[in-house]
Amino acid sequence: MKRGCKYGTHRVIEPKEVLPQPAIKIDNDMNIYDNEILIDVCALNIDSASFTQIEEACDHDIEKIKQMILDIVNERGKMQNPVTGSGGMLIGVVERLGDKLRGKIDLKEGDKIATLVSLSLTPLRIDEIIDIKPEIDRVEIKGKAILFESGIYAVLPEDMEETLALAALDVAGAPAQTANLVKKGDTVLILGAAGKSGMLCCYEARKRVGEKGKVIGLVRDQKSKDFLDKTNFCHDVIVADAQNSSQVLSEVLKVNNNEEVDICINCVNVPNTEMSSILPVKDEGIVYFFSMATSFTKAALGAEGVGKDVTMIIGNGYTKGHADVTIQDLRECETLRNIFKELYV
Amino acid sequence: MKRGCKYGTHRVIEPKEVLPQPAIKIDNDMNIYDNEILIDVCALNIDSASFTQIEEACDHDIEKIKQMILDIVNERGKMQNPVTGSGGMLIGVVERLGDKLRGKIDLKEGDKIATLVSLSLTPLRIDEIIDIKPEIDRVEIKGKAILFESGIYAVLPEDMEETLALAALDVAGAPAQTANLVKKGDTVLILGAAGKSGMLCCYEARKRVGEKGKVIGLVRDQKSKDFLDKTNFCHDVIVADAQNSSQVLSEVLKVNNNEEVDICINCVNVPNTEMSSILPVKDEGIVYFFSMATSFTKAALGAEGVGKDVTMIIGNGYTKGHADVTIQDLRECETLRNIFKELYV
């Protein structure tokens, strides 16, 4: 077997010298390199923006959609929508591990996995499209795909519906990073605490802070507070406008003996919440920005402007074992499972 | 003395419930609260964008410029340009410390300081404008100002020209954060290594890594390499395009025994260098983004896309003792001092 680059650059055909994601054509030959994983694919979950574009371009005609997907994959060697640039994820069974990976990773042939890297960089060959389920952007196929050494994945649990696991894996980075960051005795503030990733972070933080620590969830209205209070994931739930930093600061101090918190985790989905995350944190504390609406410059200049010596971290959707942490949360907590089934499956 | 809010919200007049920076009018009464510092001001360094706007609005007429500055400060209680929103910094002598701060901070009455928080949030009263030096955006005045408890400042060293100290204080956060992050034995990559903050970071990193560590500076062309090689701040200087992540990765691996680095510090001033900062770093390593051109989403999604378990930190212009670290670098290193005098004073 040949030795490949861990990021898959050995499969880039055009243009040269780029990574597989920006490439417009990659090699989908299914003879694997020694650091690749061959997957027998059963389904593609197409990215919602991509699927919508394809549906509309094909007038919602299933046969035309099938042909368009086949054409894209035949041309590019991967399922990357040329208009949106986006991909999606796939579900399949591990068929073969490259020699270099065998015994070195927690995966064996026969495992059913979901890939957590985008289809927009994953070598794919479709032999047959079996069915398309437009209501869930799902394409059932016979085909093969390749995961690079740097590619991330989750083994699908056997004790849980696939749809439930997939809904949680979508935001697996946030609770796993919370698990890494939060220590016994910490006081943790979570903005956007009633959302999907916020709730998982609250649950993880509560597990980690122990008896002397405290989890404070911030939500935007009384309805969300009532909902979150019932879960018992937080010691205190406060209602404030995450875009109003003075209000956030004063509400946090009120429930925390007038003291600043050790860690703030930002899971909101609106812009202009940087100062609300920075102000309530004590010097040498940590601000973890998981919100994709975060502005780098607002955070950097904001902390300097108020002389806050805090460490501000850019949320990384990946950390070692992130899928396991999240699946385990769902497995052990019935409340969480029921909420996810009701809201996200 | 009355007790004030550490961020100065007690001085906000209009609109209510905001921090002093976004406020349009703040209270510049010079009777201080118990956590404030009264400064006898000798000069304002107006932000370059602000000064240019004022000069043009006044047809470069010095008397008109004086009047416009007086009008702004009388109306707002601070020197915040209503068009650009920006401020600048001031230089003065500590006249009085609030009771709560006395003995608690490293400042005494009579110290000459530069404030490192913006004039756009600093209560200021101008009694007389003595002179204006348009070529360096400087306004010499008689007047008073107030620094809040959260306000940051640097005591100006007596053994160094004021202009030299000010040039370095401008980027003091970067070398001070480098000093905090880098440990003995680390391999450190610095992007934009020949720039003002990059050079200071190289120098600091070299001091910290010890004999077994390594500092690799990345610059964009041979001329910059020749310049940086001469300083001896780096063990290796490599030439690559910081926007080409494959090239950066391969050049770094070449000089580092094919191994990834522990820490990357990004000091470049162009966009699209996130992947070049992430790819060369080993798992569980650190990427420190000091570049204001960093995109939060490109960093977050980029690391996830290549399955990199790295901690990505948003550069904070402030950390405890940052001014001292930087002034000390200039004091102890003649090479650095000469370069700064030649290029930045």
Image (cartoon, coloured by chain):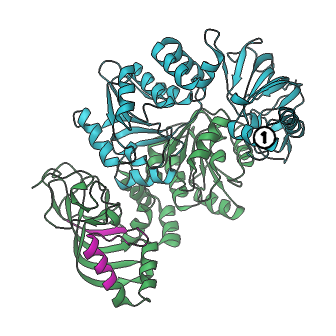
Chain colours: A green, B cyan
Q: Which residues are magenta?
A: A67-94
Work out whether residue A110 or residue A226 is closer to the camera in this orientation and state it: A110
Q: Find out whether residue A78 is within the magenta segment.
A: yes
Q: Residue furthest top?
A: B159
* Quadrant in which the C terminus of chain B is drawn: top right
Work out whether residue A326 or residue B191 is closer to the camera in this orientation and state it: B191
* Quadrant in which the N terminus of chain B is drawn: top right
Q: Position of residue B123 (x, y in %)?
A: 82, 32
Instruction: Identify residue type, mark 1.
Output: Ile
Quadrant location of residue A309? top right
User: Circle 1 — which element?
Assistant: helix
Q: Position of residue A70 (x, y in %)?
A: 28, 80
Give the vertical position of B159 relative to A232 (above or below): above
Q: Position of residue A75 (x, y in %)?
A: 27, 74
State left or right for residue B248 relative to residue B161. Answer: left
Label 1, residues with CA under 10 Å away: few <14, some 14-19, many ≥20: many
Q: Position of residue B18 (x, y in %)?
A: 78, 46
Q: Chain of mark 1?
A: B
Residue drawn at x 15%, y 52% is A102
State left or right for residue B198 relative to residue B64. Answer: left
Give the vertical position of A244 relative to B137 (above or below): below
State left or right for residue B258 relative to residue B322. Answer: left
Give the vertical position of A195 relative to A318 (above or below): below
Residue A106 in sight in this render: yes
Q: Label 1 belongs to which residue?
A: B54
Q: Find out whether residue A217 is within the magenta segment.
A: no
